[in-house]
Amino acid sequence: MNLIEKTGGKILDSLQGVGGTIVLLFRGLYWFKTAVKYRVSIFDQMLLCGVESMPVVMVVAIFSGMVVALQTGHELARFQLEGTIGNIVAASICREMGPVFAAIIVAGRVGSAMAAQLGTMKVSEEIDALEAMAINPVRYLVMPRVWALLFMLPILTIFADLVGILGGGMVSRLQIGISYYTFFDGVMNNLEIKDIYVGMVKAVVFGLTIAAVSCYQGLNAKAGARGVGRATTRSLVFSFLSILIFDYFITAIFY
Amino acid sequence: MIQIENVWKEMGGEEVLRGITLEVKAGELMVVIGGSGVGKSVLLKHIIGFLRPDSGDVLVDGVSIPNCSRKELYEIRKGYGVVFQSPALLQSLTIEDNVALPLQEHSGFPDDTIREIVRDRLHWVKLRGVERKLPSELSGGMQKRVSLARALVMDPRLMLFDEPATGLDPILTAAIGQLIVDLHARIGFSSIAVTHNMNLAYLIGDRIAMLYNGRIIEVGTPEEIRRSAEPLVQEFIHGIPNEGS
């Protein structure tokens, strides 16, 4: 009985967490009506989430493109199909690797920082102080973060796509031995608009997920340094899991 | 001003408040004393509206706080000034921005006016030249005073103090206490302060209520409390451990 109670309790807690995260997300989106007033906070968060994540995303993207080109290039060369490397690199980067890698970097770099910051604010009574001053913490803290990630993750993904393809092109030219023309001809002829917009849909969903999960975990941190650490870890784990799960379902819906 | 009527609250399977009844008159500075963990902060949270009682009612100016919607609560809280146990300043904002925050959110005043009011309130709590600093650059006592300035910035009708002397040495405690008395005389707010520091309670309280085991066991002026015939009160104010300690 005790085991059943514990299991049931865990399941209820998990469901409550999922429900709370979804409600927080919609409340964060709703308060965009006050965006003009909070424009400085939104821009600050965009800078923090997007611009400052750009170098890491670029490095990861260029090496991802290079690895895809290298791995597929040698295999395709065995069948004299190296001219199709461009198609494969572009499709895999735009559909999968660009949005997923950008999201994972942002979840690790930005999401965990959000959870830690909000968690620290929670345990040091700063959130209570906001409430006591009649300032809605969702409007003041969550809304700028949700909208910043909603705007910035697609932009990061576009840059990741471009740099990833460029990296693939460089390796194709220098190590596989096909010309830039052949590579980019393959990219341009075979990359569909759908590949781009599905990648953007993923980026938007991942951005919202990271913001909602991280803010929820931060705002629900339990007392003490341990509570903040736990909130940070949970935000990372749940963000990663959500990214991979949503990635599968979005791919399944569109392809 | 504040009427707490037979409030019961259970938390974590334990009855924290067991039928508390207390009245704070307009302009009165009420101090609630009691040992650690007797429910003093829980009582304050009921007045702010962070917690709802299991039964009973909390009325502020005749308005039932537990029955207010979130929106109504926010309206009521604009008339509150709350000083928390920790300074609870936003660490990412400067002192000026911290104190200005309630005005920026609610007043609609131009920036110049807000800056002027902020300087004024910081002056009230005897702080100068700290506007551009971050909270982490100030001592604990200074942060407490900033927290007090922030609570005063909206000209509150009701001030709530949760252990205002926590983390302060006796001299700073006396300084904060005197500051509260001076500001009370200047503004005339009603107030509830919860503390276990008897020196502070005697200094600032018009009346003192003792909370024990989830109930108010004695209410009176500082002099009446000093002379109380209730053994639990005498044990507490003289720091004598009892069986329940």
Image: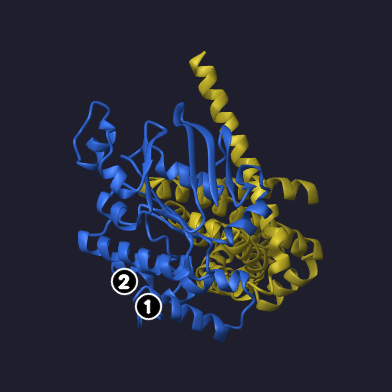
The residue that appears at 45% across and 80% down in the rendered structure is B120
Cα separation between marks 2 and 1:
8 Å
Which quarter of the rendering shows the C terminus of chain B? top left
Question: Relative to residue B41, is residue A178 drawn left or right?
Answer: right
Q: Which chain is yellow?
A: A
What residue would you read off at disc 2? B138
The residue that appears at 65% across and 68% down in the rendered structure is A161
Using the image, name the chain to which the residue with label 1 belongs. B
The residue that appears at 57% across and 66% down in the rendered structure is A61
**Which tint is chain B?**
blue
Describe the element under mark 2 as helix, strand or loop: loop
Question: Relative to residue B48, is residue B148 drawn left or right?
Answer: left
Q: Can residue B166 be seen in this snapshot?
A: no
Q: Are marks 2 and 1 on the same chain?
A: yes
* Residue A124: image location, x then y, percent: 41, 55
* Residue A227: image location, x then y, percent: 41, 46
* Residue A200: image location, x then y, percent: 72, 62
